Image: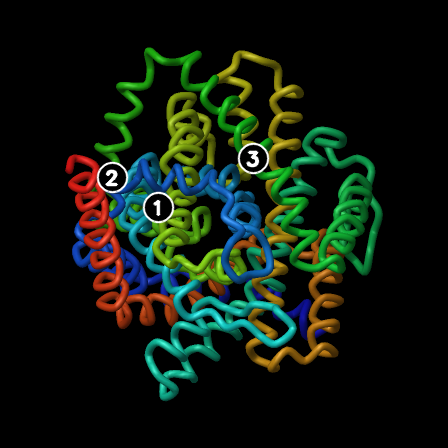
Amino acid sequence: MFLMRFLSASSVIQYICDNIVWGIPLLILIMTAGLILTIKMRGIQFKHVGESLKYMVSNETSGGGEVSSFGALCISMAATLGTGKIVGIACAIQLGGPGALFWMIVAAILGMATKYAEGFLAIRFRRQKEDGTIIGGPFCYIEDGMGKKWKWLAICFAIFGALACIMGIGTMTQMSSICDSVVSVFDPEKTNTVNIIGVSVPIASIIICAIVTILSAFAIIGGIKRISKMSSILVPVMAIGYFLVCLAVVLFNINKVPSALLTIVKEAFNFKAAFGGAAGFGILVALRQGVSKGVFSNEAGLGSAPIALASAQTDNPVNEGMVCMASTFIDTMVLCLTIGIGIVITGSYNVGENVKGIEIAVNTFSIGLHIPHLPAAIIVMLSISTFAFTTIIGWNVYGEKCMEYLTNNNKVVLYIYKVIYITTIAITPLLSLETIWNIASMFNGLMALPNLIGLIALSGLVAKETISYFKNRKNKKENELKTEAN
């Protein structure tokens, strides 16, 4: 009863999310952290983006760790490639206008440096236990890198991370989007429903929720190695397939791309209020929606990805940082930008405030590909179902590692956490969609805060060791060339 009352207070949660957690201070902190790391590492995301993409497809297995470097990346990408690619982008453009896409890209460019630092620190400060299991991420590099007096900050991150997994981005937002996409195909009028504790739920939602819950339980009970194997198969296939469909939307409407890009840039600096009000409200909304939904999508600065990447079988922090940086490039600069341009080209975002993100995505594919509504809905359903499922199992790894840190690997507590995590997936159809997204955004912001503080504090260390690595590598190559010449 208490939980239902809490979840029904959506207006309070939304106010806290928009004005306190995701207020101007956190937006500035996210952009500042990325800018500081970019400057200190001399624009690493510009100089080494090509090299980072090469490392991304390599599969190092020589170092200490639980899974291959590619497997760890796939877990990270599985958690990243969720509904943010579809629903998140659509909502950002709908609420913040086309200009939100501009700020999302700016945040991603700076976020590539942020993500590099997260991957670097994940390997640099990870801990390996006697049984061979690995624990790493912000809670480790905050405590070990900043010092024991900052352990309270590491604990805060772990608590917020565990809650975000159970009550936000890891479970409810993903399952809710799966249900909505399935209902949009099989029962768009919601004529077949059942009443569960006073909530009218489409039968299609109950069926798909049961299927996803069972599959998720199978993956979660199998542990990180099973999740890694499943992610290594699903992630490359779904990412490439989704990109090709989004690219088709752009190519079929290539003559509209220049005007769409102009609109995106123009609206990013629009001081006219989006829905009326004081001057400046429009750009503020675009900035907030672009940055917050961008972080929801690529997770740069959130601190989630390094939890998985710490388990990679590599001993080179720079290489893992490059891999982490490449994931942000693929996520936002390729996938999000492509679908975002498609949304702007088709004008599907400009259909009213009450239209859901899934409906915007369906309209984008229907208009952009010149196909009927049903095939477009099926494309969205398949995309969201695979994206969201991999996010569910990927974020379970994050939650478990947070609980390992908080409880010193207490097996009983970890088992209870798994049960709660799986249960949360199962009860999602009973909860309010608006409340679900607000809770997810709130815990995302709360996770980001301690992680960003840690990244800024350790930026000097990251920059020093990174610059030294590339300098030594350059000198080594020059010496080898001189030796060959002689």
Is 99 or 396 nearer to us in this picture? 396
- The type of residue carrying mark 1 is Gly
2 or 3: mark nearer the eye: 3
User: SS for tag 1?
Assistant: helix
Does residue 323 appear left or right of residue 309 in this picture?
A: left
Label 3, residues with CA under 10 Å away: few <14, some 14-19, many ≥20: few
Number of numbered tags placed on the structure image: 3
- Quickly name the residue at label 3: 236
CA distance for labels 1 and 3: 26 Å
Residue 307 visible in this rendered orientation of the protein: yes
In percent of width and height, residue 192 lies at: 82, 37
Does residue 337 appear left or right of residue 203 in this picture?
A: left
1 or 3: mark nearer the eye: 3
CA distance for labels 2 and 3: 32 Å
- The type of residue carrying mark 3 is Pro
Tell me if label 2 and label 1 are in contact, CB under 8 Å.
Answer: yes
Please tell me which residue is depicted at 43% across the width and 40% down the height of the picture: 331
In percent of width and height, residue 84 lies at: 50, 44
- Quickly name the residue at label 1: 290
Please tell me which residue is depicted at 42% across the width and 37% down the height of the picture: 330
Residue 439 visible in this rendered orientation of the protein: no
Please tell me which residue is depicted at 19% across the width and 53% down the height of the picture: 471
Q: Earlier in the sequence, mark 2 or mark 1?
A: 2
Disc assigned to residue 268: 2
- The type of residue carrying mark 2 is Ala
